[in-house]
Image (cartoon, grey):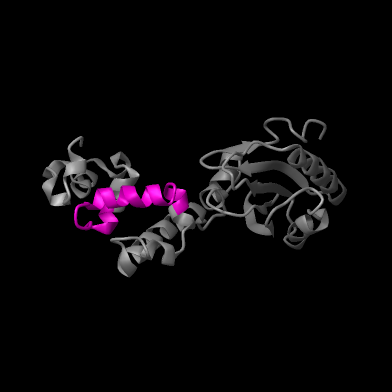
C-alpha cells in the first residue's frame, strides 16, 4: 500500500486492498491497528482517508494503549471524529477488555504465570496509575476473584500486608498471586518490589495462604518474580 498516503478516500484504494475486503478474505489478524480503526471509522475527512485518520489517532495517543486510556471527550475532540465515532472506538476497545477478562461457566484455572497475566494484562497495561491486585485461588488453582487492594504511587512502606490478605481470608482462598503494574511500561522489578514480595510470602506462611507469584505488568509484557527467583528463592 505504498501509494496510500496520496489517496484521501478508501474507495480510491483498489478493492482487494481495502481493510473491510481484506478482513473478509484473510481475517482481522492480517490488518494493521490503523486499518482496524478505519473499519470502525468508515470515512475520513477532507484530504485524509479513514486509514490515515486511524494512524493520526494512534500517533496522537501513543498507540492503542493510549487510545484505551483516553477519555471519550478527548477522542471526540479530535478533528474528524465527533461523538458517533468516539463512541464506536470506546465501545470496541471495551469489548476487547471484557473479552480478555471474561470468565466461562467454569472458573478459569491458573497453571502458569502466563495464565495469570492473561487475566489482567489487557486492562492493567493501560492504567496510568500503579495498581496492586490479588488473584484469589482455591486449592485447585481455580480463580475465585481478582481484587484491587491499592492504587496510586506505591512503595513497600505504604503496603499494609493485612489489607492485602483480607480478601483471601474472606473468600477462604488457598493461594494468591500478587499483581501490580508499572505505568512506565517497563516491568523490571525494583528492590522495593522484591522486598515487599518477601514480606508478603512470610505473611502468607503465617496465615496458611500460599503466595504463588508476584507479577509486574508492563506494556505488552510482564515479569514473574517467582520465575526469576526474586523474593521466592528462600520460600
| In-front residue for pair 199/74 | 74
Q: Quadrant of the N terminus?
A: top left
Residue at x 74%, y 57% (from the top left corner): 168
Residue at x 54%, y 55% (from the top left corner): 106
In x, y percent, where is residue 178?
69, 47
Q: Quadrant of the C terminus?
A: top right
Give the total of numbered labels: 0
Confirm whether residue 69 shows in the render. yes
Confirm whether residue 112 shows in the render. no
Q: Residue furthest right?
A: 206
Q: Is residue 1 left or right of residue 169?
A: left
Q: Quadrant of residue 229?
A: top right
Residue at x 31%, y 51% (from the top left corner): 54
Give the magenta part as a residue range. Answer: 38-66
Q: Does residue 158 show up magenta in the picture?
A: no
Q: Is residue 23 left or right of residue 197?
A: left
| In-front residue for pair 102/226 | 226
In x, y percent, where is residue 147?
66, 58
Q: Residue furthest bottom?
A: 83
In x, y percent, where is residue 113?
61, 39
**Residue 196, placed above or below residue 71:** above
| In-front residue for pair 105/206 | 206
What main secondary structure does the magenta stretch of the protein show? Answer: helix
Residue at x 75%, y 58% (from the top left corner): 172
Q: Does residue 51 show up magenta in the picture?
A: yes
Q: Is residue 162 left or right of residue 217?
A: right
Amino acid at each position: 500500500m505504498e501509494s496510500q498516503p496520496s489517496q484521501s478516500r478508501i474507495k480510491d484504494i483498489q478493492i482487494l486492498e481495502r481493510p473491510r475486503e481484506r478482513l473478509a478474505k484473510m481475517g482481522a489478524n492480517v490488518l494493521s491497528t490503523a486499518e482496524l480503526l478505519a473499519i470502525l471509522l468508515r470515512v475520513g475527512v477532507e484530504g485524509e482517508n479513514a486509514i490515515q485518520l486511524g494512524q493520526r489517532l494512534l500517533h496522537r495517543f501513543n498507540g492503542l494503549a493510549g487510545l484505551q486510556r483516553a477519555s471519550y471527550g478527548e477522542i471526540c475532540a479530535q478533528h474528524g471524529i465527533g461523538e458517533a465515532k468516539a463512541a464506536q472506538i470506546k465501545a470496541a476497545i471495551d469489548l476487547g477488555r471484557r473479552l480478555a477478562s471474561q470468565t466461562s461457566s467454569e472458573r478459569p484455572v491458573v497453571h502458569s504465570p502466563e495464565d495469570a497475566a492473561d487475566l489482567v494484562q489487557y486492562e492493567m497495561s493501560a492504567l496510568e496509575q500503579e495498581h496492586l491486585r490479588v488473584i484469589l485461588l482455591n486449592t485447585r488453582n481455580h480463580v475465585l476473584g481478582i481484587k484491587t487492594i491499592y492504587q496510586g504511587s506505591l512503595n513497600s512502606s505504604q503496603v499494609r500486608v493485612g489489607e492485602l490478605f483480607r480478601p483471601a481470608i474472606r473468600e477462604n482462598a488457598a493461594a494468591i498471586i500478587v499483581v501490580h503494574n508499572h505505568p512506565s511500561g517497563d516491568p523490571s522489578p525494583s528492590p522495593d518490589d522484591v522486598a515487599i514480595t518477601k514480606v508478603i510470602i512470610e505473611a502468607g506462611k503465617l496465615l496458611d495462604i500460599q503466595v504463588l507469584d508476584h507479577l509486574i505488568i508492563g506494556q505488552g509484557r510482564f515479569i514473574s518474580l517467582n520465575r526469576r527467583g526474586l523474593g521466592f528463592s528462600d520460600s
